[in-house]
Image: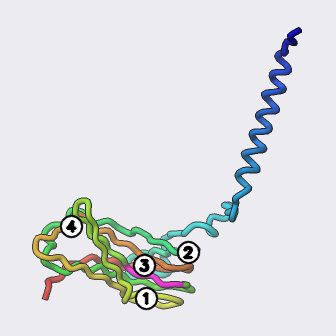
Amino acid sequence: MKKLVTGSCIAVAVACIAIAAVLLLTLGSRAGELQKLSLDDASAVALQIQADSEVKVEGKASIRITTPGPVTVCLAEVKDLKEIDDARVVYRAKVKCRELQGKAYLEMWCHFGDKAYFSKGLQSAVAGSMDWKTLETPFFLKKGENPDRITLNLVITGKGAVWIDDIVLSKEKLK
């Protein structure tokens, strides 16, 4: 003799299956956890970028970057560059830091179509707690080399606060 399954039995069976699936997913997601990050305070996991009208070199404000770890911040992308070949392109800025564990330096990328080449100002950097210092990184362009765009970054290799102000991209004749 066959037993008929009623609608309420089906509903109970579906509910049990759903509860079991949720328990398996929950237990499975915790099984390999290495660390849980709390997002209750974003400053613990994210960098902060803000204008600082109190600490500046020129104008109305500088940019203050506070980071819990290494980060590259894109500050500008310069386009519509005309006739800058056969020259030395220099990215300069004033930079200072406070309790920086690591260093901060300028990085410039020159883009030529689908190719890009960089210049890093590793020899010109700030670290620890330093007052304003002029940092720079050059890029040498041969005759006929005209980038489509130039990207200006600030690289921070550790935790701390960095200010940047008075950014200039210039073209200088090759000697």
Specify the quadrant that holds the C terminus: bottom left
Residue assigned mark 2 = 69
Name the front one of labels 1 and 4: 4
Q: Is residue 119 above or below residue 11?
A: below
Q: Are marks 1 and 2 in contact (CB under 8 Å)?
A: no
Q: What amino acid is at disc 1? A: Trp
What amino acid is at disc 4?
Pro
Q: x%, y% of residue 140?
A: 20, 79
Which residue is under mark 3? 164
- Select label 1 or label 2 by which is in front: 2
Mark before the other along the chain sequence, 1 or 2: 2
- Mark seen at residue 3: none
Foreground residue among 165 and 122: 122
Q: Which residues are magenta?
A: 102-106
Q: Residues at badges 1 and 4 in contact (C-beta under 8 Å)?
A: no
Mark 3 residue type: Ile
Q: Is residue 36 left or right of residue 65?
A: right
Place of residue 154 in the rendered image (x, y in percent of width and height, measured from the top left): 41, 75
Q: What residue does disc 4 label?
A: 147
